[in-house]
Image (cartoon, rainbow, N blue to C red):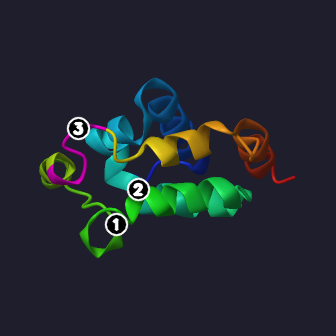
Amino acid sequence: MDKPSVSTLVENLEAELNNGGFEQFFFNAAGDLTAETIEALVAIGATHTASVVRRAAARFPGGMPPSDRNARQALLETISPDSDAFEEDDAAFLEYRDKLSELAANYQSGA
């Protein structure tokens, strides 16, 4: 499987977070690529957003969620049994301190 583009990783993160927060991001397939998503955010210059995702990911043992979806979903049950463990991280992401679409577009165009 080819690695998704930087813009695809950022778009997937944004879609999941806007729809259901980090709980949904980690539950769904987008969470398979958490480390790559953080790298993509750093690459486009979205340092605040990268730190928010890094902080949310650090709630998992070892500081990063497993890339295996089933293993990650099982861990979510213990990390966030009431689906509220990521509320502060969700709020920090939704502040949109980084203009993700603009940064991704500039990165893709080489600007």
Residue drawn at (44%, 35%) of the image: 21
**Prevalent SS, magenta region:** loop
Nearer the camera: disc 2 or disc 3: 3
Q: CA distance from mark 2 to mark 1?
A: 8 Å
Q: Is residue 40 visible?
A: no
Query: Which is nearer the eye, 109 or 49?
Result: 49
Please tell me whether residue 63 is drawn above or below residue 81 in the rendered image: below
Secondary structure type for disc 2: helix
Q: In the rendering, at what x and y percent does residue 101 appear?
A: 72, 36
Which residue is outermost to the right?
Answer: 111
Q: Name the residue at 68% across, 39% down.
A: 95
**Whether label 1 touches label 3, CB < 8 Å:** no
When asked about the image quadrant of residue 46, the answer is bottom right
From mark 2 to mark 3, how far is it between C-alphas?
22 Å
Q: Are marks 2 and 1 in contact (CB under 8 Å)?
A: yes
Amino acid type, residue under disc 1 in the picture: Met
Q: Where are the magenta residues, as a range?
A: 78-83
User: Tag 3: Cα neighbours inside 10 Å, few (<14), some, or many (≥20)?
Assistant: few
**Disc on the earlier residue, 2 or 3:** 2
* Three-letter residue code for mark 3: Asp
Residue 72: percent from left, percent from top: 20, 53
x and y percent of residue 38 in the render? 53, 60
Provide the residue designation for mark 2: 34
Which residue is tagged 1?
64
- What residue is shown at x 55% (from left), y 48% (from top)? 5
Horizontal side, residue 97 vs residue 92: left or right: right
**Which residue appears farthest toward the bottom when viewing the image?**
62
Amino acid type at image mark 2: Thr
Instruction: Return the residue nearer the eye: 109 or 45.
Output: 45
> Residue beneath label 3, please?
82
Q: Is residue 97 above or below residue 24?
A: below
For numbered disc 1, what is the local secondary structure? loop
